[in-house]
Image: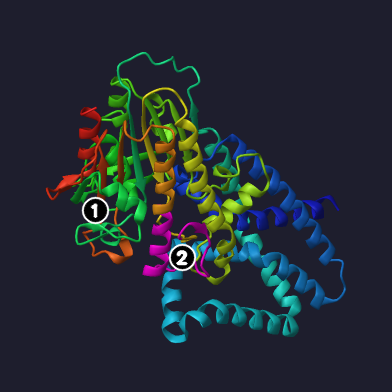
Amino acid sequence: MQKQILYYLWLGLSLNTMFFYPLISSLSDNPIYLHWNHTNSVEYILVSCIISIIAAIIIFISYRINFSYIRCFLILMLSAIPLSSFFLYLLWKLEVSQLLKNTFQIYFGDYLYIYGFLLLIIFIITFLIIKYPLKIIKFTIGVILVISPLSVFAFITIISISIKDPTIEIRNDLLSPYSGSIDNNIIVFVFDELDYKYLFSDGVVKSVYKNIKAFSEISDNYHEAYAPGGNTLESMPGFLIGKKISKVDDTKGLQLFEILEDGHKKQIRFSDGNIFLLAKHNGYMTIMYGWLFPYCMLMHDYLDACHSFSIYNFASVNTHPSLINPIFTNILLTPHRIPVGFIKFWIYPYFQHETVSQTYKLAIDTLSIDHPKFMILHFSIPHLPFVYNENKYSPPANPWLQNDENYENQLKYVDYLFGNFINHLQNNNKFENSDIILTSDHSYRIKTKEGSTRRIPIIRKKINSKVRDDIYKSVGSEEVLKITLESN
């Protein structure tokens, strides 16, 4: 009996590991995007114990049911989600899922791809349960046992990642009262994937974006501005250390490496040319709030306040310890291209909205500190998933559908959010003496020709500026940032 219990528990643990395969694989391959800490590991271990025990009990009960059809149904229903989670993520990693998607869409269209595929699987499983219930049970258990050594890999991964515990928040409550001569703020808005061509028309901000347009009319407008890289992975590190980066390797744990022209890799050291180091030297309180990278860990020594939001870890927005966090994180990592992955449609939009809202709130709260501030805000919009419609949270049917309508609706929310922040500055008499930059890390890539994704908008309002200026000289965003800091 003892061996049977251990056998059922091993099967339960294996099903749990297969379900969490997207999370385990990501922690192993790209931990830098998860911002995984000790609390997350404890949450994962607790929820894994619960899931494994429940799965073991269901398997134990099913083997005591005489009706083979019911037994087969129970085991298949129990295994369906873990097996789907494992194989769909594996196919995505092997880049097979995109091929399957394209094939189905070519021959059957989007609707049949999403729903027809699921119906086909349900039909086949139902047929097999009726025709060969005992063989299906044996085959399913066999597959689980073959994959079960993955549990050892999962254990090793969780233990090894738990040792690192990256910093995701910095609060310098010991900042001494300011007594220097600087009386201004520098605030930099980086809206992810904000595209120049969608924002401007004939050199003027489109009237539909009324808040940015009004800001533009008293600012310097750079019409030939370029990001340090063609995507966020290269652009943001380059922006912060003041250099162009062509290619980055993000698979080396919690560090980033620049891939040089000769193929060699060089660690990106944020101490080299770090813009926050210069800001601190000039007397500013340094602040970074943003998504994707663990900014607080990468630049810990140069920041007075920081909060970094993961692109996948649900605990980034649900900060209280919760058993839901690892489950939702795993779902966020599930490929949305596959029909089963469409469960993300209910979770990721909320996650995106909370990331934006909490970033904004942190920035507003920080403005009340009586100290000159150098603050960079990296917002996750208008980058997909698309969850906004003008001034409200209103996800479309498919938040990952990249078209002009979804992008422009999200861009309208960028305008709304930016306008609210400017109003707050004005209402608190902090607008005139603030040097404000609105920019991006890259263009709307799916709508941009390859090699042109670095072109971005830059709009800079200098202190007490009242007039508009248009600048057509080619310039890098990292150059404008450094010039701004040096001129204050």
> Which label is found at residue 162?
none
Q: Amino acid at mark 1?
A: Arg
Q: Give the colouring mode of the picture.
A: rainbow
Please report the residue visible at 21 percent of the width from the left and 39 percent of the height from the top: 480
Closest to the observer, 158 or 276: 276
**Which quadrant of the structure image shows residue 280?**
top left
According to the image, label 2 marks what residue? 400
Residue 21 point in image, percent of width and height: 57, 55
Name the side, left or right, on which 12 lies relative to 93. Answer: right
Can the viewer see residue 441?
no
> What residue span does the magenta drawing correspond to?
390-414
Q: First in sequence, mark 1 or 2: give its number.
A: 2
Q: Does the magenta-highlighted stretch encompass residue 406?
A: yes
> Which class describes the residues within 10 Å of circle 1: few (<14), some (14-19), or many (20+)?
many
Between 288 and 102, the one lying in front of the other is: 288
The residue that mark 1 highlights is: 454
Q: Is residue 425 left or right of residue 346?
A: left
**Callout count:** 2
Which amino acid, by three-letter code, is at mark 2? Trp
Q: Secondary structure at mark 1?
A: loop
Instruction: Give the secondary structure at mark 2.
Output: loop
Could you tell me which residue is drawn at 61 percent across and 36 percent down?
A: 39
The reply to whether discs 1 and 2 touch (Cβ–Cβ < 8 Å) is no
User: How far apart, in angstroms, are the residues tagged by discs 1 and 2?
Assistant: 22 Å
Please give left or right for residue 344 compared with residue 359 in the image: right
